[in-house]
């Protein structure tokens, strides 16, 4: 707040005072007062007026500057109404009242949506657990009555299972609350269970699996990680070439982090599209050819889950050569303390 | 025959699971009513319990805790909930294993077999399998024949073990690969061929020529 601006706001009173002074001067002249009196009166009045004005300016300046600084420092700016101090002047009081009321009403509104979303997520989770029952039963029936037909149905059931799992993690990825559980996990176990989940389609597609150097402990939620790796492997299967298909999975330990590499020799991704693969709904050229039905959700979800878990996720690819996905597990301070 | 008790409220799934377990050489018991489940479960005196978490009247976690107060019977928790936390809670309540629905049946069988073996202490006997012509020493990963013995690699051992388990039956290449994958050796068709050849050479070295026969288009058979 600048004094000039404040003065401008009070221009009318200033003009009125000058107008009053002129009247007083005229009266003084009519009654032929002393010259000293004629000079003293306007100066005194103007001086007092400016002093009063300046005090009032200072009050507002400290108050508003304080408010602006707090706003600047706030991470969630909408919480400013919680931090407004009581002003000593009436227009400030109005501002405080307005901020408080809008803030509260906005919070109520946001909470309403939070609740609706939470409720929906709970429903989705419940539904997913329900739907797993008939799938489990169907799979049992297939196992007890193995024919070519039921085995083909089994393949489709596997697809359904994958889509359901995706929906579950999608619902989980959208909530603010912490939905995961970090503990010590062995990379080899995580990778193995992801591969086993895709056993049928890997074998059917005759994909060579090469895993090595995975005896490393990381701190993460192994269920979430299994899901993420599972999605990446599924992509590798989906976008594989016709011959000599291969997926290589290994890890490297570096100073501050453990990097898990998942490499395939599939059809790769066009150069211009690599930066966009983590965008929601992005399917790219590969997603549209050869009837590969891409939803553009898989990698988007992986990235989102990795962000929540505090893992890095990077993708490099060369058209017709293959794709390499890097999952980066940081070594937290927790681990360092333990090692000491 | 080992008795496995299936505690599952979905009738269809229960029956299919029963058929499946019976096919795989177990005696499967079930309970149909759940209003007095803890006593009913204990009365069955099963060797192993497959316990669903979502049950009417009492939930599986509570039942598990109650059973543990009086019995040491192996318990496998079966559930469709699959977060790390659910798993931890179950294990804290005294369950020995945790399987999520829809389960991989091979893995379920492996877990059942593993638990039964552990509680029975038959592990020592299982380490050596006598196959008349030779002895398969699993813990040392060796084939022994009279004085001679020869070492096997991990994959060779698994292949031979599988063939021994199915002695006299034709085993297809797909079945072998499936078995190897389930025990976390992710080999492909070519690697299997290489491993088979090496295994045969090794068997030949100790005088067991042509003990594994190739059935063209069908698979292998161990005589």
Image (cartoon, rainbow, N blue to C red):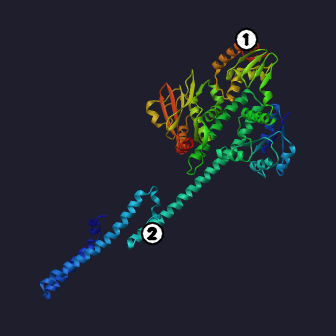
Position of A48 relative to A211 (above/below):
below
Looking at the rendered image, the disc whose residue lies closer to the viewer, 1 or 2, is: 1
Q: Secondary structure at mark 1?
A: helix
| Residue at point 67%, 48% (across, down) | A126
**Splitting the image into 4 quarters, where does residue B84 fall?**
top right
Q: Residue at x 79, y 23 (%)?
A: B129
Q: Quadrant of residue A340?
A: top right
- Tell which residue pokes out farthest to the bottom in this image: A31
- Quadrant of the image for the N terminus of chain B? top right
Residue A246: image x %, image y %? 57, 24
Contact? badges 1 and 2 (CB < 8 Å):
no
- How many numbered discs sit on the rendered protein? 2
Residue A33 in the image: state x and y as whole percent.
14, 87
Nearer to the camera, A282 or A34: A34
Residue located farthest toward the right when viewing the structure as drawn: B43
Same chain, marks 1 and 2?
no
As drawn, the label of residue A179 is none
Residue carrying label 2: A97
Q: Chain of mark 2?
A: A
Q: Foreground residue, A146 or B199?
A: B199
Judging from the image, what secondary structure is the residue with disc 2 in?
Answer: helix
Q: In screen coordinates, is B174 left or right of B39?
A: left
Q: Residue lying furthest front in this view?
A: A340
Residue A299 visible to the viewer: yes
Image x and y of residue A181, in percent = 61, 46
The x, y position of residue A219, in whole percent, is: 58, 41
Residue A109, placed above or below residue B176: below
Examine the rendering and report whether any part of residue B83 can be seen: no
Mark 2 Cα-neighbour bin, 10 Å: few <14, some 14–19, many ≥20:
some
Q: Is residue B55 above or below residue A201?
A: below
Task: Identify which residue is drawn at 69% across, 29% down.
Answer: B182
* Circle on res. B204: 1
């Amino acid at each position: 707040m600048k004094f000039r601006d404040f003065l401008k706001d009070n221009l009318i009173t200033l003009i009125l005072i000058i107008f009053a002074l002129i009247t007083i001067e005229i009266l003084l002249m009519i009654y032929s007062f002393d010259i000293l009196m004629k000079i003293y009166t306007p100066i005194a009045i103007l001086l007092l007026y400016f002093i009063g004005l300046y005090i009032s300016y200072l009050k507002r300046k400290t108050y508003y500057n304080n408010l602006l600084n707090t706003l600047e420092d706030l991470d969630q700016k909408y919480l400013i109404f919680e931090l407004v101090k009581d002003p000593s002047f009436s227009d400030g009081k109005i501002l405080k009242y307005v901020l408080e009321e809008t803030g509260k009403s906005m919070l109520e509104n946001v909470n309403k949506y939070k609740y609706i979303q939470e409720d929906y997520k709970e429903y989705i989770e419940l539904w997913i657990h329900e739907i797993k029952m008939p799938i489990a039963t169907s799979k049992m029936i297939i196992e007890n009555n193995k024919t070519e037909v039921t085995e083909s149905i089994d393949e489709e059931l596997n697809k359904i299972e994958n889509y359901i799992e995706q929906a579950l993690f999608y619902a989980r990825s959208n909530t603010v609350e912490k939905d995961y559980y970090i503990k010590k996990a062995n990379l080899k176990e995580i990778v193995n269970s992801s591969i086993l989940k895709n056993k049928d389609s890997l074998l059917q597609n005759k994909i060579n699996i090469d895993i090595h150097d995975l005896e490393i402990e990381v701190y993460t939620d192994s269920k979430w990680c299994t899901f993420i790796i599972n999605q990446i492997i599924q992509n590798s299967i989906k976008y594989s070439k016709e011959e000599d298909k291969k997926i290589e999975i290994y890890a490297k330990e570096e100073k501050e982090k453990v990097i898990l590499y998942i490499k395939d020799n599939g059809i790769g991704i066009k150069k211009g599209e690599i930066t966009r693969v983590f965008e929601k709904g992005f399917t790219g050229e590969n997603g549209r050819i050869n009837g590969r039905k891409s939803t553009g959700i898989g990698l988007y979800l992986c990235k989102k889950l990795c962000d929540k878990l505090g893992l890095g996720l990077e993708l490099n690819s060369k058209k017709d050569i293959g794709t390499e996905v890097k999952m980066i597990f940081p070594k937290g301070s927790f681990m360092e303390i333990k090692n000491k | 025959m080992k008795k496995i008790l299936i505690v599952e409220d979905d009738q269809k799934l229960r029956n299919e699971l029963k058929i499946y377990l019976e096919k795989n050489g177990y005696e499967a018991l079930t309970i149909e009513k759940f209003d007095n489940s803890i006593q009913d479960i204990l009365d069955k005196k099963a060797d192993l319990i497959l316990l669903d978490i979502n049950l009417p009247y009492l939930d599986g976690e509570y039942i598990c805790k109650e059973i543990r107060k009086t019995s040491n019977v192996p318990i496998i928790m079966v559930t469709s909930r699959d977060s790390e936390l659910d798993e931890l809670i179950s294990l804290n309540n005294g369950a020995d294993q945790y399987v999520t629905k829809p389960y991989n049946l091979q893995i379920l069988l492996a877990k059942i077999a593993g638990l039964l073996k552990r509680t029975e202490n038959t592990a020592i006997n299982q380490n050596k399998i006598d196959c008349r012509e030779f002895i398969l020493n699993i813990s040392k990963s060796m084939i022994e024949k009279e004085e001679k013995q020869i070492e096997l690699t991990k994959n060779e051992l698994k292949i031979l073990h599988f063939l021994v388990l199915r002695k006299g039956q034709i085993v297809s290449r797909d079945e072998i690969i499936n078995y190897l994958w389930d025990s976390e050796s992710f080999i492909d068709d070519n690697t299997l061929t290489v491993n088979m050849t090496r295994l045969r050479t090794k068997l030949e070295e100790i005088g067991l020529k042509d003990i594994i026969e190739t059935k063209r288009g069908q698979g292998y058979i161990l005589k």
